[in-house]
Amino acid sequence: PRIRHEAIEEMRRYLLPGAQKSQGGGLLPALGIGLLDERVVVNVTKLPLPVIVAAGVRIPEGQGGNWAPLTAKANYNANPNKVVQMNVVVVYHKSIKSSYQSVYKRVADMIRHHNATYQFGSKPFGVVEAGDMNQHWGAIERYFGGTKLPDNVFVLDLARPPRGQSNDPAYGAVKCFLAKGGFLSQFVNFQTHDHGRSRDARDEKKSTTILSGVARQILSKCGVRVWWVTIPKEVPLPAVFVGIDVFHAPRKFDPKEGKRKAGKESIAAIIVQILRSHNPAENSLVEIYCETESRAAGKEMELGPAMNRAVSNALKAFKVAPSSCYIWRDGVGDNSIEQVSQQEIPAVRQALSNPGQVVGAKTKAADVPLSYI
């Protein structure tokens, strides 16, 4: 409140006649704009910062906006008798042949430091040297096609995109191949930072920050609940959380037409998660439902029907009548948000109130508080 008060007073100061000393005189007072002395009083409910916990490391309220670095201290205290050793296959670009082993060791040590259920061994199970494009996915296909693999395989791909490109164009093909085979994987982009060559302490710190995030991402993919939050009591439960985003393939340069053209179809993903209790101990089961939809290249709008279908199917699958709903919509600029929200919010409201969707449901769509973010 004090900071807000001071900010308002500062704005009022610039709206007083003669207060602006910029060249050309006081524009706002000249337009007749001023502020009344009275304040408009509104009632608000201030929600407390949710408690953010990472394996016993509680994030201080003052660091709620930058809590990720503290999770590096998290210790999950896994039972040594239940630790699962992952069989890691390291794929590395041929240009980092001299440093891939040291980078792997750093990631494995960071994972081991968390003392979680899943661990990387001191040495990888297998190693694949790769190049660019078809020499990248081709090397992986040959290895997996000719190698008898054990259970619990994890692929760590240390990639370096071709010169002049920030992302590896082989990423999609490699991810698709590994996903179809049921293999967990994590990419590390050496174009973003060369983890094998730290020129100074600043470089080393940046590398450590990135790789510690990679370690947590790996644990999360293996099944570790890396961090969690408590939901404020003011949030009505059960709650439905909906996340939407659309992936657009990079545009490619067409030498015949001399311009960049849309590539493959775009893919929309809608994730629905159910939360039933304010007590973290009662939320050990994570309930997530997902639907995807292929779309014309570059198409971001008109997701209302897909969102309606996904939310309806999720409510039916989880047999839940929600008391609140929260939608996170990514990929929409400020100039389009009104158009998109006018189509998508009614579609979700309809799903929330679909008669007969959930046995015993009594809540109507208009009664379910909904936030569109």
Image: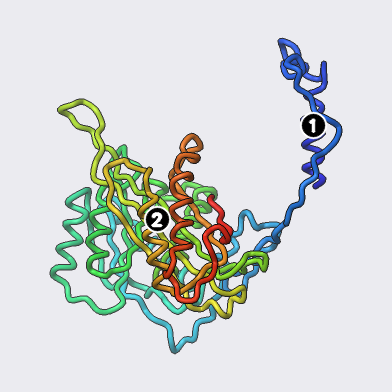
Q: Decide: is 241 above or below 148.
A: above
Image-quadrant location for residue 177: bottom left
Q: Is residue 106 visible?
A: no
Q: Decide: is 145 above or below 296.
A: below
Indicate left or right for 347 with 90 as reference. Answer: right
**Residue 159, percent from left and from top:** 31, 53
Three-letter amino acid code at the position of disc 2: Met
**Residue 268, percent from left and from top:** 34, 52
**Residue 83, percent from left and from top:** 42, 83
- Specify the color scheme: rainbow
Q: Local crowd at mark 1 within 10 Å, few (<14), some, or many (≥20)?
A: few
Q: Which residue is mark 1?
A: 10
User: Is the C-beta separation of discs 2 and 1 under 8 Å?
Assistant: no
Disc 1 on helix, strand or loop?
A: helix
Q: Which residue is mark 2?
A: 307
Indicate left or right for 365 with 46 as reference. Answer: left
Q: Which of these two is toward me, 37 or 361? A: 361
